[in-house]
Structure formats: structure tokens, C-alpha cells
Amino acid sequence: MKVCLPILFQFLSFISFAQQNLVSYVHPLIGTEKMGHTFPGATVPFGAVQLSPDSDTLSYEFNGKYNGDVYRYCAGYKYEDKTIVGFSHTHFSGTGHSDLGDFLITPTQGTLQLNPGVASNTKTGYRSAFSHANEVAEAGYYKVKLDDHNILAELTASNRVGFHQYTFPKSDQSHIILDLMHGIYNYEDKVVWTYVRVVNDTLITGYRQTNGWARTRTVYFALSFSKPFKSYGQKSEDKLQVYKGFWRKFDQTKNFSEIAGKKIRMYFDFDTQEGEKIKLKMALSPVSQENALANMQAEVPHWDFDRVKTKAQADWNKELNKIQINASENDKINFYTSLYHSFINPTTYMDANGQYKGLDQGVHQANGFTNYTTFSLWDTYRALHPFFNLMQPARANDMVQSMLHHYDQSTLKMLPIWSHYANDNWCMSGYHSVSVLADAIIKGAFKGDAQKALEACVATSNHRDYEGIGEYIDKGYIPSTSNRTSVSNTLEYAYDDWCIAQIAKKLGKQDVYATYLKRSENWKNVYDTSIDFMRPRLADGSFKKEFDVLQTDGQGFIEGNSWNFSFFVPHNPAALVQQMGGPKRFSARLDTLFSMHLPDKFFAETEDITREGIIGGYIHGNEPAHHIAYLYNWAGQPWKTQERIRMILNMQYKPTPDGLGGNDDCGQMSAWYMFSSMGFYPVSPGSEAYSLGSPSVKSAKLQLENGQTFTVEAINQGDKNVYVQKVLLNGKPLTQPIITHSDILKGGKLTFYMSAKPVKK
Amino acid sequence: MKVCLPILFQFLSFISFAQQNLVSYVHPLIGTEKMGHTFPGATVPFGAVQLSPDSDTLSYEFNGKYNGDVYRYCAGYKYEDKTIVGFSHTHFSGTGHSDLGDFLITPTQGTLQLNPGVASNTKTGYRSAFSHANEVAEAGYYKVKLDDHNILAELTASNRVGFHQYTFPKSDQSHIILDLMHGIYNYEDKVVWTYVRVVNDTLITGYRQTNGWARTRTVYFALSFSKPFKSYGQKSEDKLQVYKGFWRKFDQTKNFSEIAGKKIRMYFDFDTQEGEKIKLKMALSPVSQENALANMQAEVPHWDFDRVKTKAQADWNKELNKIQINASENDKINFYTSLYHSFINPTTYMDANGQYKGLDQGVHQANGFTNYTTFSLWDTYRALHPFFNLMQPARANDMVQSMLHHYDQSTLKMLPIWSHYANDNWCMSGYHSVSVLADAIIKGAFKGDAQKALEACVATSNHRDYEGIGEYIDKGYIPSTSNRTSVSNTLEYAYDDWCIAQIAKKLGKQDVYATYLKRSENWKNVYDTSIDFMRPRLADGSFKKEFDVLQTDGQGFIEGNSWNFSFFVPHNPAALVQQMGGPKRFSARLDTLFSMHLPDKFFAETEDITREGIIGGYIHGNEPAHHIAYLYNWAGQPWKTQERIRMILNMQYKPTPDGLGGNDDCGQMSAWYMFSSMGFYPVSPGSEAYSLGSPSVKSAKLQLENGQTFTVEAINQGDKNVYVQKVLLNGKPLTQPIITHSDILKGGKLTFYMSAKPVKK
């Protein structure tokens, strides 16, 4: 008798944690309107390919100059738009700056047009009008009707392969456009070089190098067609090249297989029958055309679109089922869409054979880990990476490994700040890699060399010529004359230093611990006791005279004014409470923050968020305030934490395209939602502690990678029952609004007893 | 007793063919003045690095537009110039088009200047005046005093490493400039991308990608300094980049180790003592920074400049000693400088570990062969490759292997036309790879798969959409309306087809042989019997009406008018003699060619040569006529071949900087010299036959790779004794002015009896 053990085990696992079809709660269109900056297209969890429609991008044909509106098209697609340019293969999810948009493909029919045209008149180019009525966006699947061409476009993806399925009308003028000039953040000269070889009538390979937000970035591709094209060609906008001049030996515009230049658009011609499907597989690689082709062979060696879609959605279901919640339908949509958005970035940056491009622009072999990129660390250290350490510890370990390899490849000897595709763009403040490392080490997710991790943290934090670190070390703060974000930087460095101290403590490095614990108190150096606000200081120690606590720009802060940033001591709220005059004054200030009026002129300078992203003066749409609502817990008023958390969950997350009040920021906004909706939040990553709030779910069952199950239950849950009467951990009442990571890892149950009345004790 | 066998064998070999110091006869400055286009710097035989001074190049700072004078600086250095910009690492030798000039290094002292400045005033930049009195150019070694900076510069090289030695004065402002904008054929936007990482204070690595004559070309480097620089920096001429704008976190201009952009110049600062030497090793790779570093370790793991120089000159001596001649001192200089120039190109295009970049821009491993690039085939198929098949058959085999791999990597499925650095620029006419393959196969140098070689030849010659091939196949000639070099192309295709026929014949492919032998007669289709000249034909079969046999441009020819090209039937001179009316009329026409006057207006359109490169209407400075002087042998007047050959040897090759009347063309002009000065020449490569002329040497001893020695001896040699009375091969008189390759391979002696009187019989 043959027993198939793997299937048996799978079945047993199925019994213990029955899979639900949670993909149905994922609405990728959430966040695509206004400032969410998410994309609606197809991707798999942490996939290298994000195949998604671009409704527009800044294109230098229409706007040759740098445009402040660059933020608008961070994800390539705006729900408000009426036309689609085409489908490109790489997209950030929720960022506040942009790049990518590689390899735009657009099916058309009729007269060949090789420029995108303008949105106001789709007849001017290959773009098409579309209607949301004809649009379906699911996890791992996207469908839309391109009205101008009467073509149904369907997209799905594996990790490294974007799979297109286009249903054409009958036409002897059907075309597939491959626009190699298209890109997101596509200023003049962004495309540094493009190389394409037409291998045969169903396969092309090549690469494109861009100088965008990632300065030196090359993406290799292999593109396979299910049907041979009958002819093909290119239009180049390049100036004279040697090959095009005197020595021209070929007609390079048509059926010429060796193509290179900076500004190239290609087309492929077909005869199609009514309803005929043409499928395309576009595989990407950071390393080589050869690897791109091997990725295609490894992941999608067939032409079965539905099989790829089914696999993509099964992969999503597997990830989504790691947390099963009981909640209202809308809350389920919010929750699982948040979970979906949390598991998009960081992205796989490694070929099927383990090769990847390093920060040194060399090819490396990833031994024993998956290399990841797209680290939006200023955002994601707060809740996303802690969420990974809870629900994705194996991947979290690989992410830390990826960051340590980045460090190894860096001549600057720095951990990543904001890195993607073998580059660092050093965006935003702090050196928050150290928080990610500390959290993974403290919580046991990191399985590598912690000693080496500590060395990398110490080296990064002592890089004197990086954004004021030298003066920060010498003076304990960054003078406002040296750095335009001197206060927020000082505050963030202080928190980061506390993280380093935690690693040192765990490793028994007492001297390092003492040094960094002392540095972690530097927040006090920018606290002006005369006004009880964080405030810019000059090199001579005096505080900056012209100062407005409501203003962000030019006041030493970024994405948050002093009102918000004055609460930024996540590693020591108790000390901050004392500094601000004790629990009563502290909570009164919190009350003011949530209820004040922020005049429009200050809103205008607050980046990346809608008016709805603000509650009073509290700015949830940006990240610096994400921990603030939990600070009432330190002021003896946890019921205010509870009501604020529920208010934010309610106001800032909606199951609609405009449902996000600010950039999702690679999943940080979403991770905040998931933690908070389950009733706990990592106020200070690098610590084992979670601060308790008010769960909005009725229950949540977390299937941990160590095999344990941890359940959160909210007894007497309801929209008005936002206050917590008591909390039991495995049946025992908690005396403090805190649980630890170890508590969760052991498995068990956290029971909240909810009420409509605050428990003021 | 210990016997060191290798040394013993070396000693025995030394006895049998005692090495002479032939490097002393190599004068690299020959050809650097006027139109020779050779470079004076340091290289080893077939080396990947050509480290040589650039006295100027077309720089877009001073001339933003394409300039017809691009030819002037093909080799970067003109003897006529008074200043040196610096020393770059890659140079063509003798070409008529340009590219390369990678990684210019200039030592300076005093105030830092980061632009080259203008030749008329060296104070405007980092360039320096120099004097030929302070200049030494040897095979593998170059030395010059940079007057403006009082720095002695010395250069040598291994295969992949350029070694600089700079002797500085005492200064606390000594600098090494690394100009990454500099290049040869340096039109605006040639530099596509540059990436540099400063690994530590003695090592930098990086790469540069250019869009020049090679369209997609990347050279990786590793640059090591013998002394740590005290500081460094860069100046970028780039427009705004993301990293330089709002989010600027570093001062990127100074001591910042991660550098990238399109227009970058770097500097490295030193304190120097009087007479202090700073040495630099620059290793190149076509594949990666890592490979460049490995190449440096493999070839020059030390800092001993003299050791590298000694090795380079020993390598040259080994190659030069393959032919030992007895001749006048000037003839020895001409001969060994020609031999030197013949052994520069093709160049090694492969790392020490066997990796190279293919035409598909992918990385390949060369298994069992050395990969070569820089194939100037329209020039070099004539005498240079035959010379390799005689004196360098192992390398000739590798060259053919390289060409076949190029074919494999080509989506066009074509053998190289004019290829360098993983690109084909398809320069000039014909598909002369097939001649190189045929000659190597017929002469036994090629050890690979001849069947596959034939397939590649057939595929290339049937590429209908390449430069008129389709019409050539259909009509037997290319209509003048389709192609601006329709006649020369038709003639060259016909010869090439004969070469393919020879391979087919050898392989017993009778049908292929018949097809191509028929195609080889296509020269007759452009022969206008009414005027007895080759002449453009229209598509309807009629000859072009407006026609001038003296004119090249617009008449269907390239680098040669109808007067010269009408003799271009190298594969069947006997038929041509008949076509032209028999021996008498034929030789009379040859007489006219050598004695006519070419009016200035026709000279003006003759590219790349000086007035001295012309004898009557015979243009030796360009290649199409190189076989013509030998054609008297087919007209029963070998004494005229003899006197013409001696005249050309005398007039066209001089031991002076202006000694070459035209481009050396990667060694073709030099190979002509060596064959002709030894008394035989391959009129029709692809044939075993050499046509005899008049040797100018007293004797030449050829040490063949098969171990045989073949000696040429000229009895009664003298400047006036240019006529051959009789020729003995191994003591037996020859009845025809022909010897075969097999005759030579067997070893033996060819004895010419010279006389001042022609033997007219």
C-alpha cells in the first residue's frame, strides 16, 4: 500500500487550520485613489514582478522638466484617471517617491501608433479609455477592457514572471506595443540604455538601465509570445548613432533583430481572429537575460494563464490564512487588504538560481537566504518589520541577511537607508536598519551572526559625514544650521541608538550598551523645557528663535511638525511623560493634539496625505505619529488609547479606492492597521513589548511559523464597545497594558472584554 | 645532481634559434604622424590593454558636434601635437574610424584642474606640454616628461593591466586625474554611464559604458595605487540627479566612495617627495569589476614596474624572433615595426578566468580558445590573417573560434563584419569573415568544426536584407540605386563567394561548391566591356550613364575608384586578364595605373591617406589595390611585379613617424610589408598559393609553430637588384612565380637570385 505522506501532512495541517478563501477579501483597488499610492495589478507575495496598469506617468514628451507632481504617479495608476497607457512590470506599493514602471506592454489594433498619446484624447496614441465597470482587481489577478481597441486585458504573475492574456477582436492590424521609454518618475534621460535582441518570432530578450531614484539600475528581461508575430519593428527617438549614419547596412526600423539605444519603442504585428487570445510571459532578472529566461522556464514553463492565476491566488491564500479573523465584512476587507499590502514589499531580488546584483553592481550568489530589496525603512521599521518578525520570521531573517549583505557590499560601510534594486537613495532620516536588526534579534527571528549585525549597526551609526552624525556624536544633537531635518534626525538617531544598545545588551557587550544607551538620551538635547516642545538648536546650544510648533518645513522636521515629533521617544515614553510634566499634563497634551485645528497653511506643507489623513493635529497619513495614540498607556489613561485607536481604525482605513488617508508606504500603514485591529502594537521595535489598544476584530487566530497558534478574542465586541474592561492572557488578567513577543510565541489566547464605557483606573 | 629540465629545453631551443634583441628595431612612433593612425604607447602582443598617450581627442567641450576630423585622432596621439592630455588604456592601431580611449589618467601637480584645457594654452587645464626629445617609445614601454607638471611618466603593460609609473617633484599638491569623460570619438553623450566605487585608499573599481562606434560597450576596471591617496573627489557635469537634490545626505564631491553618472572626472591627492614614484595598475575586464581585480592579481600581483616592462619586452622578443631577417638597419626597423604592428590586433577579449562578453551582451566562458576582438576584416583578410595562418596558426585558430562564437551569439546569424568589444559596426563592404575562415581551413590552421564554419559562411552570404545581398543573389550584381558601394560590394561578394566555394570543395560539398563558384563569377556582371572598366549598373541591367573611372565617391566604390577596383578579381586574375583583352593590354593597363596622374580633386575624396600613399593612380594607402602589383605575374611580366613591389616597399614604408602613407589598419599595411619584403604574397586568401615578388631582405628565417624552419634567401641582394633572375625552392628552380603554403610548412629554403636587370621571359 502506497501512502503519500506529504499529502497526508498537508491534509492534517488543513484540518488543524482550515484554509478559507480569504483572497475574496483583498481589494487591490483600495488606496489607488488620492494619496494611497497602491497599485491595482497582479503580484504574488513578496514577488519580484508587479504587473499593473499605468494610467499615466510623468512623461517627458509632454513635460520635459522635473515636476512636483511626481508623487501623483508613484504607483503608475490613479483611480481617478479615465485612460490606461499600458501594463508595466514593476511598481512600488504605497511609496511617497517613485521609480520603476519597467517594460510597458500595450495591446492595440488598428493603425499602428507608437506614442502613448494624451489622456484628453486617446486617438493621439496607443493608450485606451477604460471604465471601472469593466475592471476587476484581485490578489494576483487584474482584468480590464481597453475600450479604444476592444481588447480584454488580463494579467497575472508568478514571482519573477508577468503573464498577460489579451483577447483580441478580428483584425489584420493587431499589435503588441513594448514601450521601452515608458517609466515611472520618467524625467528626461532617465533611460540610460536599452538593449533588445529578437531571438526568434516568439522570444525577445534584453535589458534596460535607468538613472532614476535608483541611480544605477538595470533590469534584464525575457519576453515570450504565445503566437509568432508576423512582423515587428522599432521607432527610436535617439539622436544620430554611428549605426544609423553613413555605414547603415540594414533597415533597422523593421524586422531588425539587434536593437539598442536610449529611446526605443517596439511593436509586434499579428493577424487575430475574433476572440483570439495572445499571451505574453515577461520574466525579469537583476542579473542577465539568460537568468530571466531561466526564471521563466523555472516558474512558468507553460501557456496556461489560469494555472498561473490559480497558483498566484493559492499563494496569497496561504499567506492570508496565517491570520484568520472574525469581523464585519468591511473590517475583513480592510484587514485582508492590509495583510495583502503588507506582503508585497520588500520584493524578491534574486533569480531562481540564487544570483542577484549587489550594491557593488557585481553579481552575487545568495547562499542560504532569499535576497530582498525595496526597503522603505523610515516607514517600515515601525510596524511592518515587527509584523514580519511575528508572522513571517523566516522571511524576516532573510531580509536582515539581505541588509547585512548590502552592508558588506557598501564601500561606505552603511546598512541600507532606503534601498531598492542594488542602490541606496538615502531617503528620509535616521538609520533605521538598526531598528529592524534589533527587533529581529531581540525577537529571535534573526538566525545569523548577531555579532556581525552589531558591528554593522555601530559602523552605520558612526558614519560621521552622513547627515549630521558627526555633530550628533560630538554635541548630542544636530545643529539646525547643518541639516534641514536636524530635530527629527536627532530624535530618530536617539531611538536608533537605543536599538543598538538592545543588541549590545543581548550580546553582553556592556561597553557598547552603555555608549548607545547614553546616546539614546539625546532626545533631551532638542527638548526645549521653556516651551516643552522639541525645537531646533543652533551650534552654540541656543534654541532657534523663529519657531512655529505647527510648522514642519524649515523647522528641523520632516513629515511631521513639532507637535507630532515632540512625542517621538518611542523607546522611553515614561521619561518623556516626566519630561513633559507628568501623566496629567502629558495626556492633556495628547488630547490637544487629537482635537486641535491645524490651519490649512500647515496642512499644505504636509506631504503625501489627504485632509482626511489628519485627526486634529495628529497626522496618521505620515508615520512619525504612528505610536502616539498608544502613549496614553504611559500616562495612566489607557481608555484614551483605546478610543483613539478605534477612531483611527475607523477614520483612516476604508474599503474604498480612496480608503487610505496617506501613502501606504510599502505596507507600514497596513501593518499599523493589522496590529491595532488585533489590539496590540509595537511602540518601540527592538523591545519584546507590545502595547495594548482596542481590538476591532471579534477574534483573530494567528498561525505562527513555530507551529503555535495565538488567538485574540474580543468579548462583547461592537462598534461602540471600544473600551477594554479587562484583558486575560491565557485566562490570567494582565495588570499592565502590555504583552510580550514571547507570550505570543508560546501560543495561547489573549481575551479582551469590551465595553462602551471607559475603565478609568 | 638536480637538472632543471625546462631551463635545459629552453636553452636547447635557444641554441637552435638564438633569440636576438629585436625589440630594439621596433619604433612605435612610426605611423603616428599624418595618416598612419598607430599609437606610440605600451602593449603586449594581442594584449587587451593599449596604454598610450592621448595628445588630443575630439572633446565635446570644445566641439559639441560631430566633426569630420574624427579620423585625425583614431589612435589618440598625433606626432605633430605639442601637448599630452593624459594616458588612456584602450586604442585601435591604425584604424580609419575610432572609438575607445578608456580611463584617461594624468598626473599633475599644483592647483587642481579638472578639465583637459586647450592645446594652445596648457594653463587652461590638466594637460601638459611635452617634447619629443623627452619621449621614448619602445615595444611594451613608453616614457615622456610632462613639462607643465615636471613629472616623468612611464608606461608598460601586461595583457590586461596597464602599469603607470610617475616620478613626481616635491609637492603637497600632487594629483592623479582619472578622467571618465575622456574618450576617442568622443561626441556628446558617448559616455552612457560610469560607475566607480572607492574600495579603500589604494583601490577603486568600476565600469564605463559607451555608445560609440561600438554601440553597447562596457569596460570594467580595477585601479590600484602604490601609495594611499590622502584625499579624493569628483566633479560631475551631469544635470540634476535624484541623489544630488533635495535628499542630499553626503557631500558627494569629496571623499565620497559611491560615484555614478554620465560625466565624471575624479582626482586623487598626494604629498610627494622630490623624485618620489607613484605607481598605478589599471586592470580591465569585459565582464566585471571582480574579474578586473582578478586579472590584476593574475598578471601583476606586485609593484615592480621594471619586471612588467621586462616581461612585456620579452614577450615581444619572443614573437619578433619568429622571423629573423638579415637586412639593412632601416629595413629591419621597418620590418620589425611592421611585425610589431601586425601583432597588436586582434586584441584579447577575455578575462584570465576565460569569461568574456558575447555579442548577445551575455557573459560566456571560452572553452579551449582565447576569445579575440577588434576584427577590421575588410582590411585584414587580405594579408594579416594569412600572415597569422603562417606565423601564428594557433592564434589564427582562436580568432576563427572567436568569429564562430560571434556568429552563434548573433540573432542576425552573421559572421562579424567589423567587430569590436561585443558589437558589430558592419563597417565597409563584403562579408570577409568567410575569407578568413577559408584561408584558415585551406591552410590547416583551423582545428575546429569546418562544417559548422561553412554553415556560418553560407548563412552570412545569404542574409538578403544586408547591404544588397538579396539583389546580388537575384541579379548577380547590386543595382547602383540600392547601395552606394554597389560595384565594390559586388566585386567583394564575388571574391568572398569563391572563398566559400573553397571550403565547400575541401569538405566535399559539391552542390555548395557549384553554387558559390557560380556566384564568384558575378564580378563579370559589373564589368562594362564597352569601356573595359567595372561600372555601376542600374536595376534594369543598363550601366550607369554618368560615370568617371577616376572618381570613388558616388560611383559605387569605396576607398578606391574604378581604376583600382577594376583589378579586383583576386580569385581569378587569369580570367580578368582575358576579360581585359589578354596579357598585353592587361599589363599596359597596369602600367598606366602606376604612372597616371590622379588629379587633386580625386585625391581629395580618397580617405585616410597622404599624397605619398598614391603611386600614379595606384592607391597603396587604402587596401583594395594591395594585390594589384602582383597581377603582372598573370600577364607574363613578373619583372614588373618585382620592380613595383620594391618601389612600393621603398616609397610607402619609412622608419619615421610619418613613414606610413595611409592607415596601418590593424596591421594590414604592415602584413603587406612583411610578405612583400620576404618575396611572396597571398593574392587570393583562401588559396594555398603565394605569388612571388621581389624580396627586399637579404634573408629571412621563419620559425614555424610546427617546428619547421623556412628560410628565404636573396642572393646578390641590393637596392638596384630588384629583379629576380631565378628562384629555387630547396634547390629546385621554380617554373611559375608561385609557392604554396604547404611548401613553406614543410620547411626548407626559397632562394631568389637578384639582378639589376629584368628577366623578360
Image: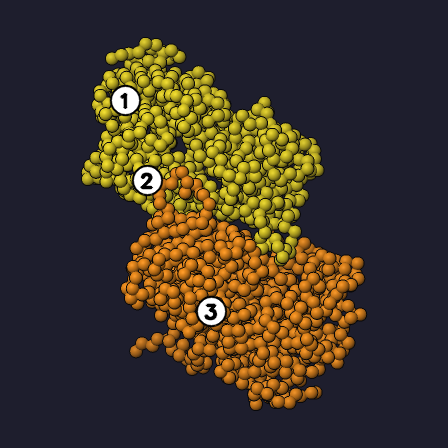
Chain colours: A yellow, B orange
Q: Residue at x 55, y 26 (%)?
A: A136
| Label 3 Cα neighbours within 10 Å, binned few <14 / some 14-19 / many ≥20 | many
- Mark 1: which secondary structure? strand
Task: Look at label 1 and name its amino acid.
Answer: Ile
Nearest to the eye among marks 2 and 1: give it. 2
- Label at residue A467: 2
Residue B375 in the figure: left or right of residue A681: right
Check whether the beta carbons of the residues at disc 3 and disc 2 lie within 8 A of each other.
no
Residue A282 visible within the image: no
Q: Residue at x 63, y 74 (%)?
A: B614
Residue B12 in the figure: left or right of residue B661: left
User: Disc 3 is attached to a residue of which chain?
Assistant: B
Q: Position of residue B186 (x, y in %)?
A: 51, 57
Task: Look at label 3 and name its amino acid.
Answer: Pro
Q: Identify the residue position indicated by label 3 in the image.
A: B40
Q: Could you tell me which quadrant the C terminus of chain A lies in?
A: top left
Q: Residue furthest top?
A: A757
User: Disc 2 is attached to a residue of which chain?
Assistant: A
Q: Is residue B609 above or below residue A672?
A: below
Q: Residues at marks 1 and 3, common chain? A: no
| Nearer to me, B390 or B574 | B574
Q: Identify the residue position indicated by label 1 in the image.
A: A738
User: Disc 1 is attached to a residue of which chain?
Assistant: A
| Mark 1 vs mark 3, CA separation in Å | 78 Å
Residue B655 visible within the image: yes
Q: Position of residue A688 (x, y in %)?
A: 28, 28
In the rendered image, which quarter is residue B583 located in? Answer: bottom right
Disc with the residue nearer the chain's start (2 vs 1):
2
